[in-house]
Image (tube, helix red, strand yellow):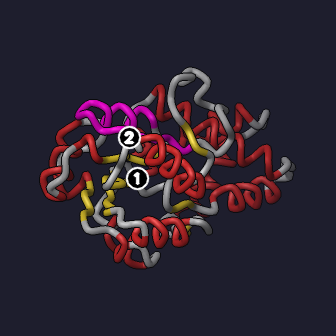
């Protein structure tokens, strides 16, 4: 299959937060020690569980999901005691840095390569009104000829309407598109509902998405170029 248009999710596809570092500091202050890799995997598993069991929750303001999130996080890290105090400490640190987003080290190289190869690029994201400023601040906005944000169009993934708006604006057919995101239940289901192929990023193999054995995954955006080359080569 030959793709000509690549769509991207934003958070944990192109961008990330240094939340694991922050949480490890919060734990140290509370006298709790965990290995950094343990913390990384606990965040990952918590993300995937909330994506699966509580669709749309992570797109809401952090105050709405953080108590549940920290509860699961502490469960996976086997942390006991005064979780409410830990939550309060974490939430203060989180709010002070909530607007900080960082670009994955491989993102610029991959986007540059895609443009050089002639692909058109776009964004379809469940995000609040800060989306465009985040993309601009991170130096990413210039890469995309179409940017569709849920808060601007009034509908969110996986509703197929947000994908239809994107396709209409970009003037492309779903069969020529590939959607890349980290949330199967928003990204995969939404994209496939209108006939668009999708690829899911999961940074720890099948960890956290064991139920999705038939879904194609990559470990990071860095794997996207080899994936496209294999698909386009197979087309000829």
Q: In the rendered image, which residue does mark 1 sit on? A: 9
Name which quarter of the figure residue 80 lies in: top right
Q: Position of residue 131 (x, y in %)?
A: 34, 65
Tag 2's secondary structure? loop
Q: Position of residue 36 (x, y in %)?
A: 80, 52
Closest to the observer, 83 or 17: 17
Q: Is residue 31 visible in this depiction of the protein?
A: yes
- Mark drawn on residue 236: none
Residue placed at 53% from the left, 53% from the top?
Answer: 224
Q: Mark 1 and mark 2: span between their CA atoms?
A: 21 Å
Q: Earlier in the sequence, mark 1 or mark 2?
A: 2
Residue placed at 31% from the left, 53% from the top?
Answer: 124
Closest to the observer, 67 or 97: 97
Q: Is residue 25 magenta?
A: no
Height in image: 122 above or below 160?
A: below
Q: In the rendered image, which residue does mark 2 sit on? A: 1
Residue placed at 69% from the left, 55% from the top?
Answer: 20
**Magenta range:** 184-201
Name which quarter of the figure residue 23 lies in: bottom right
Q: In the image, 151: left or right of 32? A: left
Q: In the image, 80: left or right of 197? A: right
Within-10-Å neighbours for mark 1: few <14, some 14–19, many 20+: many
Return the residue found at the far front. 236
């Amino acid at each position: 299959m030959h793709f000509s248009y690549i769509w991207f999710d934003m958070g944990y596809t192109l961008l990330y937060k240094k939340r694991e570092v922050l949480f490890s500091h919060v734990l140290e202050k509370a006298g709790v020690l965990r290995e950094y890799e343990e913390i990384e995997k606990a965040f990952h598993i918590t993300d995937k569980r909330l994506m699966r069991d509580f669709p749309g929750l992570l797109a809401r303001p952090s105050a709405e999901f953080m108590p549940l999130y920290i509860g699961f996080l502490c469960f996976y890290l086997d942390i006991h005691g005064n979780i409410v105090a830990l939550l309060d400490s974490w939430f203060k640190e989180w709010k002070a840095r909530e607007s900080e987003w960082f670009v994955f080290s491989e993102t610029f190289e991959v986007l540059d390569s895609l443009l050089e190869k002639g692909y058109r690029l776009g964004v379809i994201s469940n995000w609040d009104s800060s989306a465009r400023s985040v993309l601009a601040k991170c130096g990413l906005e210039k890469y995309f000829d179409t940017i569709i944000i849920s808060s601007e169009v009034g509908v969110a993934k996986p509703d197929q309407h947000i994908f239809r708006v994107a396709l209409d604006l970009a003037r492309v057919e779903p069969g020529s598109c590939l959607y890349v995101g980290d949330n199967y239940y928003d990204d995969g289901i939404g994209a496939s509902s209108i006939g668009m192929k999708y690829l899911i990023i999961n940074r720890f193999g099948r960890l956290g998405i064991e139920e999705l054995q038939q879904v194609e995954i990559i470990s990071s955006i860095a794997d996207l170029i080899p994936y496209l080359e294999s698909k386009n080569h197979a087309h000829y």
